[in-house]
Image (cartoon, rainbow, N blue to C red):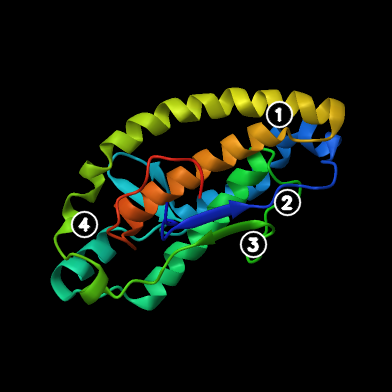
Amino acid sequence: MPPYPVQLNIDYPEVGLDRVSTAFRLFAIIPIAIVFGALSGSSWHYGTASTLTIGGVGLLFIPVLLMILFRQKYPRWWFDWNLQVARFGNRVAAYFLLLQDRYPATDDDQGVHLEYPYPNAQADLNRWLPLVKWFLAIPHYVLLFFLSIGVVFAVLMAWVAILFTGRYPHGLFDYVSGVMRWENRVAAYAFVLVTDEYPPFRLKP
């Protein structure tokens, strides 16, 4: 099958993973998770009528949708923002899911490679399709819900395996990274809006 335009590839750790880092991953992830949460946007509520918004804005969805709908344009810096936020989020996720030992960086791929094609909005994107993409992706949401349950058990088994052997079982690694790949394709189609090609129902590239 031809490769899908959106690709996520995570390098398999050829050297042994750190057992101590793996054992305390739930605690080690907290600082970078706070950074990502601030980047993604969050709100503090106080009183009954006031809201103070702090942090970033996360992925740009509504502005991109409106720009494609009314102007048939996808501003390059909006595309670059969405891609970099998604890359950072995937590095954090890969670290949390034990796929990588290196602490997530804000500006280096660290073996987690996510690529989006920059679309020519007039030639490559249907201006009306962004209104319904989120709805068309519902079958993927359902399948990803069950696949994500499988990820929980896969990561627990990998955690035990790493503590005893220092290795992430290859089959479990392929499954967890495959679910991440599937999730990224759906997000890129339905919310980042970089392609009109419907995501395939598969874990492989």
The kind of residue on which mark 4 rests is Pro
Identify the mark at residue 123; answer none if there is no mark. Answer: none
Identify the mark at residue 158; answer none if there is no mark. Answer: 1
Q: Is residue 139 toward the left or the right of residue 186 in the image?
A: left
Query: Of marks 3 and 2, which one's residue comes earlier in the chain?
Result: 2
Q: Residues within 10 Å of mark 2 (few under 14, many from 20)?
A: some
Rendering coords of residue 15 (x, y %): 84, 47
Circles 4 and 1 in contact, beta carbons < 8 Å: no
Using the numbered discs, state the Cα–Cα distance from disc 1 to disc 3 in whole angstroms: 23 Å
| Residue pointed to by mark 4 | 130
Rendering coords of residue 184 (x, y %): 45, 49
Q: Is residue 41 toward the left or the right of residue 88 in the image?
A: left
Q: Residues within 10 Å of mark 3 (few under 14, many from 20)?
A: some
Using the numbered discs, state the Cα–Cα distance from disc 1 to disc 2 in whole angstroms: 18 Å
Q: Residues within 10 Å of mark 4 (few under 14, many from 20)?
A: many
Identify the mark at residue 109; answer none if there is no mark. Answer: 3
The kind of residue on which mark 1 rests is Ala
Q: Is residue 168 above or below residue 76?
A: above
